[in-house]
Image (cartoon, helix red, strand yellow):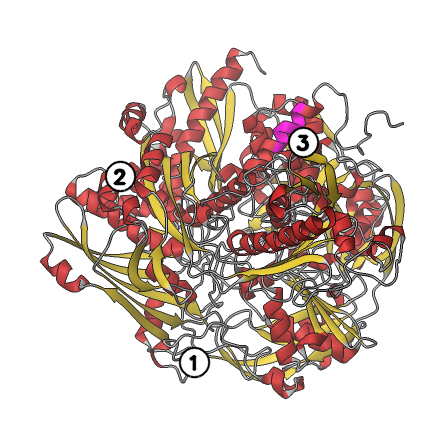
């Protein structure tokens, strides 16, 4: 019996062991390992004059203490610039341990290895570092002014400036009947997964192999970097992602200093070493994102159609720039959203500050772009006295204009061209789901009772499924079980379930018989990583293609064995059988056995594959030229370019007129991610994203003072939402399959978070009648805005 | 900054009944209950997310009452009973009704915060067997989750309440599948 | 974030605890640990020794006697909160405790511990300051009662000496004709409040005859604001609180911090005080109507 798995809300196979507490997260591993504590800079900018470790060596249980001076030459080199770009002319990355200077609070200065973390922290506290504090550069405008420098040899604190343009934005704006210029500010937040970073390493002296476990979104690249910096052949290094307690982008950056130091120490000491980051460390040494200042100049006609858009972005990327320009490039392009804009210019300056470096956090620059565009749409509507959905409607790209190529370059280096989507249909669905037209009546009723209500919306387009590729390996074992591997790793997205669904359909096997492994270089060594909402698109399709190879081979072997044409065979329930004659069938496990000609029957089931067992043809070799033994297949999916998902959110809020406290009454999501492998998993991704969007809009920020001290480096003061802060969410789907890949999938991982700040700003503005140009928005800030507006 | 040589740490005998079994360890006074469970007893189902008592990932039951194990010194609870997530599923691995409900309602994604939520839910349902949605939301608003947006978690607790209603089962106890002794 | 090393003692009697407190320099009392252990984990406190009072019998007294609620040092917030006999005679305790952190913290944290810790953002010290009452403390030098008004010296600093152990808090029961309320606004469920108000209101013949308030989060410590001038004589059933905000604005001394600026806190305190006084007035009428003594 075969039920179609693709599109089914199958319960996750990951769950039982996780629910029983049998997950194996990084800190659960290596119970006997030495543990690490890192001495971190308390200053945002300082010279390191001296490091006195003598006090640490007295602590019972300390194994070793390392500073920059102890490192071999290769480890003294700076960390790599992961994504170079021609415009990135002044790239600076950090050293593994500070080499004479520190540039953000939290930067690693020394490493202690001890019997356990308690002792390691004791020792770390006894290390005396003499600093000469230097002035700290904090804030976009301080950085841009260049009066104080983060790095002495980088003038203006400018790592890169990049302009992209199409048409003649300045000209069209100048000639437009209407024009608005304004500024927007978005503050930093961070991924903040529940599990912090961690790395464990074991050097096997017998096998001369290094095994690294890391809570990473890219085991293959960590493996390569470790091999490179430790000067080991790649074949001697393996990297495995254990169960990972959330990533959301922060775990794509690599190598962390600890990801190099821990394997190096493990080899040096001949003993397992483990680093588990604590929460305070995470706040001050794991990357942040979202901070931008945006200057918008827009020209539009009396119907609200945008004629020209000129945007300038200041992007604060922190003390170092390991991830290159990806985030502001994404902002620059994704800012355009679902709108037909022919005359557009965007320039960003990526600036150094003495703060934690910036790299992608779920959304990766898209929330900022969405904020810019959607605030612009609202302002246009307000200026013209038009309904906000109407103004958007007039600017939407229509389905018959697909594919729509803007003529810009996306973050994958390829054309920024939308392949599919029905934006007008999405908007219509949203209006209905949110009962947009019924709102004026709701507002009036509330007003009569002294309550302030507002409604807002935001739309976005999300480039997903970025290349260069992912791969899949599918193998039918002689038992009939199917083993699947792909190289990217998993942080809760349900890959093992979703990819098993793909294989179950492609191979006609029971879902329960498929087992998927992700993120283990021993099982699959060619991969890129989990980011940019790409896993389902990339690995999903690669695994599908690999499964098809297996399918084709199984049918071929069965065809020969049964002496029936391939066209007359079908794959059902783990068997190849003759169409219309189901009794004539061969189990896939037997086909697997037969696919590997044997000399030695190692057990009963293997006998059929030995040379005397069946009368094979003797005019052909047992393994034909170009063939391989085994019923397995490997394939890769490499996209021509990204595929574009889209969505729209609407939110209804109530603002307490006295306290300015904001309560979300209703949150509506319309979402199009193409083909859904598992709707339950997709919906979970959306819900999680919405919570982060709400968090980023109303609660979360990284509060740096002017000295570069992070004032809220704990969960007490960095306000991640609890259930009480997250509204119930109504979701409706549109499914416009991607024409760019065999399964028609677009990514879903980041969708929920992208329009959060824009939609909430829109709604709160609507409630209080005061312009909202900066997020996040607390009751205190909203109160100040309202007071200022009253006094104007 | 202390420059004197630190004295060797005194060790204390701690005895706990963990998931019905008497367990012993000899640990310094400063050993947190979370670390004793995870490292001295190798029960790694309880997770550590913050060590300042806010995220709830470390929540276990102490004499049936939910507490933050990261804010509990193991020595201060010696002699008492602790229930962790490993104490819920049946001996044969069959999921406890609360665990099953989490699976059925997609109440977990990465699974890191999940044991803390499950222990909180078990204690909550023991007190409030028939909660309404608002009460559930309130009770679950002391644990952080970054993956799910809470919708699946709240649905799971409601589902578990329904499942357990009228059975007389104490959700804090190890599950006994039907027919088992 | 692991605690630094410390010596640990678990005395089995008050006398033993007092002897240890006298003998050991730099010792801290461990009750529920919900305030202390986070400080230890972050190494913001590095005591030489901890004296765990969790095994001392007799510290868990919780009863109503002689017009007071007696709360022993070992009584957890949650146990106090749930006690119906206590809630009947002094409802402000439960009202405030409903807002303290989360149930899981209340399961371990003690009310006496919270009062001695004297966190200006914490609800219970403000409640004690408002209701009056005494804290019974002991040392090898003898016993004494600290009046509520003298209990808190400053933020995180109580009048309890380093060698003293707090044994019991005594809080008066609600007088007839009074009502109370605790209103606060926090960013998230269970967070420290941006501002909060505890208030007690006296009603006679349907009119307000007195109103007092203490605050959290706005720099007033345990000072009590007499709001009577703002509301005396007014109809308790639909209390006009228009003058409350002005009285509050002049009284509070809030600071800017990452969560709110001072101007907002001042404004918020006024708004919440108005709401609290209204709620307390309604409570007073309800209690009088129900014949609660």
User: Residue A628, image x and y in percent?
Assistant: 70, 64
Instruction: Measure the C-alpha gap from mark 1 to mark 2.
Output: 46 Å
Main structural element of the magenta stretch: helix, strand or loop?
helix
Q: Are marks 1 and 2 in contact (CB under 8 Å)?
A: no
Compare marks 1 and 2 and give the one earlier in the sequence. Answer: 1
Residue at horizontal 74 percent and vertical 57 percent from the top: A595
Residue at horizontal 24 percent and vertical 55 percent from the top: A341
Instruction: Measure the C-alpha gap from mark 1 to mark 3.
Output: 54 Å
Q: Is residue A264 above or below residue A8?
A: below
Mark 1 crowdedness (10 Å alpha carbons): few <14, some 14-19, many ≥20 = some
Subunit that carries the residue with mark 1: A
Q: Identify which residue, A347 or A538, lies in the foreground.
A: A538
Is residue A627 shown left or right of residue A372?
right
**Would you name the residue on which mark 2 appears?**
A389
User: Residue C250, image x and y in percent?
Assistant: 36, 43
SS at badge 3: helix
- Residue A151 tag number: 1
Q: Is residue A96 above or below residue B138?
A: below
Q: Identify which residue, B14 or A620, lies in the foreground.
A: A620
Q: Quadrant of the N terminus of chain B?
A: bottom right
**Would you name the residue on which mark 3 appears?**
B124
Mark 3 crowdedness (10 Å alpha carbons): few <14, some 14-19, many ≥20 = many
Mark 2 crowdedness (10 Å alpha carbons): few <14, some 14-19, many ≥20 = many
SS at badge 1: loop
Subunit that carries the residue with mark 2: A
Q: Looking at this view, name the residue that lies furthest to the front.
A: A619
């Amino acid at each position: 019996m075969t039920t179609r798995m693709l599109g089914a809300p199958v319960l996750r196979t990951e769950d039982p062991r996780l629910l029983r507490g049998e997950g194996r997260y990084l800190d659960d591993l290596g119970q006997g390992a030495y543990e690490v504590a890192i001495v971190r800079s308390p200053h945002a900018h300082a010279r390191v004059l001296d490091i006195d470790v003598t006090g640490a060596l007295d602590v019972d249980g300390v194994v070793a203490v390392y500073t920059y001076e102890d490192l071999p030459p290769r480890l003294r080199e700076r960390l790599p610039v992961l994504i170079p770009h021609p415009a990135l002319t002044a790239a600076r990355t950090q050293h593994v341990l500070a080499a004479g200077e520190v540039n953000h609070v939290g930067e690693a200065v020394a490493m202690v290895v001890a019997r356990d973390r308690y002792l390691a922290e004791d020792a770390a506290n006894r290390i005396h570092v003499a600093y000469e504090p230097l002035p700290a550069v904090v804030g976009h405008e301080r950085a841009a002014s260049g009066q104080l420098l983060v790095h002495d040899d980088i003038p203006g604190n400018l790592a890169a400036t990049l302009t992209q343009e199409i048409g003649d934005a300045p000209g069209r704006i100048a000639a437009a009947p209407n024009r608005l210029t304004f500024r927007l500010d978005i503050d930093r937040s961070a991924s903040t997964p529940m599990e912090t970073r961690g790395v464990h390493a074991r050097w096997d002296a017998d096998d001369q192999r290094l095994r690294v476990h890391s809570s990473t979104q890219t085991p293959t690249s960590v493996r390569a970097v470790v091999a490179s910096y430790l000067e080991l052949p790649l074949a001697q290094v393996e990297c495995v992602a254990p169960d990972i307690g959330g990533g959301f982008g922060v775990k794509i950056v690599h190598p962390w200093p600890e990801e190099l130091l821990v394997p190096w120490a493990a080899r040096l000491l001949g003993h397992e070493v483990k680093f588990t980051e604590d929460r305070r460390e995470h706040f001050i040494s794991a990357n942040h994102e979202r901070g931008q200042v945006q200057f918008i100049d827009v020209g539009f006609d009396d119907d609200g159609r945008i004629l020209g858009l000129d945007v300038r972005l200041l992007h604060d990327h922190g003390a170092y720039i390991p991830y290159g320009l990806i985030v502001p490039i994404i902002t620059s392009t994704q800012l355009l959203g679902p709108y037909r804009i022919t005359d557009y210019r965007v320039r960003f300056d990526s600036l150094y500050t003495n703060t934690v470096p910036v790299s992608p956090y779920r959304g990766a620059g898209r929330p900022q772009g969405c904020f810019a565009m959607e605030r612009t749409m609202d302002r246009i509507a307000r200026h013209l006295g038009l309904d906000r959905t109407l103004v958007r409607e007039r600017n939407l790209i229509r389905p018959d204009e697909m594919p729509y190529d803007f003529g810009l370059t996306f973050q994958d280096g390829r054309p920024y061209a939308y392949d599919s989507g029905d934006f007008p249909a999405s908007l219509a669905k949203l209006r209905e789901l949110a009962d947009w037209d019924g709102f004026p009546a709701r507002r009036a009723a509330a007003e009569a009772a002294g309550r302030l209500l507002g409604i807002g919306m935001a739309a976005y387009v999300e480039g997903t499924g970025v290349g260069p590729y992912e791969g899949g390996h599918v193998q039918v074992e002689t038992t009939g079980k199917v083993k699947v591997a792909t190289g990217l790793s998993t942080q809760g997205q349900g890959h093992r379930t979703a990819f098993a669904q793909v294989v179950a359909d492609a191979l006609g096997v029971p879902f329960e018989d498929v087992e998927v492994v992700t993120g283990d270089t021993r099982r699959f060594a060619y991969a890129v990583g989990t980011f940019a909402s790409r896993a389902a698109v990339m690995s999903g399709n690669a695994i599908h293609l690999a499964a098809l190879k297996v399918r084709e081979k199984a049918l071929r072997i069965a065809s020969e064995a049964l002496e029936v044409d391939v066209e007359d065979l079908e794959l059902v329930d783990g068997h190849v059988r003759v169409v219309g004659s189901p009794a004539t069938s061969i189990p896939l496990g037997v086909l697997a056995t037969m696919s590997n000609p044997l000399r030695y029957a190692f057990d009963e089931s293997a006998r059929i594959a030995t040379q005397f067992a069946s009368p094979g043809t003797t005019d052909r070799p047992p393994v034909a030229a170009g063939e391989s033994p085994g019923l397995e297949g490997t394939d890769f999916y490499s996209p021509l370019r990204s595929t574009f998902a889209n969505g729209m959110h609407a939110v209804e809020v109530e603002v307490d007129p006295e306290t300015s406290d904001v309560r979300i009454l209703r949150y509506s999501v319309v979402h199009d991610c193409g083909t859904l492998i598992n709707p339950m998993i997709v919906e979970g991704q959306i819900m999680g994203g919405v919570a982060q969007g709400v968090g980023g809009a109303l609660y979360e920020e990284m509060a740096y003072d002017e000295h570069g001290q992070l004032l809220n480096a704990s969960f007490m003061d960095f306000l991640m939402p609890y259930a009480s802060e997250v509204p119930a969410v109504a979701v409706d789907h549109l499914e416009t399959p991607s024409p760019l890949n065999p399964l028609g999938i677009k990514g879903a991982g980041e969708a929920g978070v992208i329009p959060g700040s824009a939609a909430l700003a829109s709604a709160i503005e609507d409630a209080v009648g005061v312009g909202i140009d900066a997020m996040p928005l607390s009751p205190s800030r909203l109160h100040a805005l309202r007071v200022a507006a009253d006094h104007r | 900054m202390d420059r004197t040589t630190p004295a060797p740490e005194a060790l204390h005998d701690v005895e706990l009944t963990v998931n019905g079994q008497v367990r012993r360890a000899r640990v310094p006074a400063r050993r947190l209950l979370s670390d004793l469970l995870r490292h001295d007893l190798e029960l790694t189902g309880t997770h550590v997310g913050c060590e300042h008592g806010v995220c709830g990932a470390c929540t276990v039951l102490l004499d049936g009452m939910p507490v933050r194990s990261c804010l509990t010194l193991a020595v201060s609870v010696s002699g008492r009973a602790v229930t962790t997530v490993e104490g819920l599923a049946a001996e044969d691995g069959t999921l406890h009704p609360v665990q099953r409900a989490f699976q059925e309602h997609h109440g977990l994604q990465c699974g890191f915060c999940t044991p803390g939520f499950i222990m909180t839910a078990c204690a909550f349902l023991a007190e409030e067997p028939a909660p309404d949605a608002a009460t559930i939301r309130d009770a679950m608003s002391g644990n952080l989750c970054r993956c799910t947006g809470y919708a699946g978690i709240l649905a799971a607790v409601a589902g578990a309440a329904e499942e357990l209603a009228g059975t007389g089962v104490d959700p804090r106890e190890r599950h006994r599948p039907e027919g088992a002794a | 974030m692991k605690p630094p090393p410390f010596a640990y003692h678990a005395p089995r009697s008050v006398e033993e605890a007092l002897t240890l407190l006298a003998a050991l320099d730099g010792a801290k009392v461990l009750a529920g640990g919900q305030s202390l252990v986070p400080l230890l984990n972050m190494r913001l406190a590095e005591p030489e020794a901890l004296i765990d009072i969790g095994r001392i019998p007799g510290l868990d007294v919780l009863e109503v006697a002689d017009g007071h609620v007696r709360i022993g040092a070992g009584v957890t917030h949650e146990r106090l909160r749930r006690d119906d006999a206590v809630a009947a005679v002094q409802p402000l305790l439960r009202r405030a405790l409903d807002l303290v952190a989360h149930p899981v913290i209340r399961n371990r944290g003690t009310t006496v511990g919270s009062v001695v810790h004297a966190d200006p953002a914490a609800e219970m010290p403000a409640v004690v300051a408002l209701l009056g009452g005494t804290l019974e403390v002991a040392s090898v030098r003898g016993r004494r009662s600290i009046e509520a008004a003298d209990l808190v010296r400053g933020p995180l600093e109580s009048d309890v000496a380093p060698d003293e152990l707090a044994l019991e808090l005594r809080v008066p029961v609600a007088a007839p004709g009074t009502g109370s309320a605790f209103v606060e606004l926090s960013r998230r469920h269970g967070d420290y409040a941006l501002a909060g108000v505890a208030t007690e209101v006296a009603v006679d013949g349907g009119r307000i005859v007195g109103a007092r308030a203490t605050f959290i989060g706005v720099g007033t410590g345990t000072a009590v604001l007499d709001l009577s001038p703002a509301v005396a004589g007014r109809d308790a059933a639909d209390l006009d609180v228009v003058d409350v905000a002005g009285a509050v604005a002049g009284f509070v001394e809030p600071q800017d911090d990452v969560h709110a600026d001072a101007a907002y806190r001042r404004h918020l305190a006024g708004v919440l005080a108005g709401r609290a006084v209204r709620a307390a007035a309604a409570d007073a009428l309800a209690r009088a109507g129900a014949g609660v003594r």
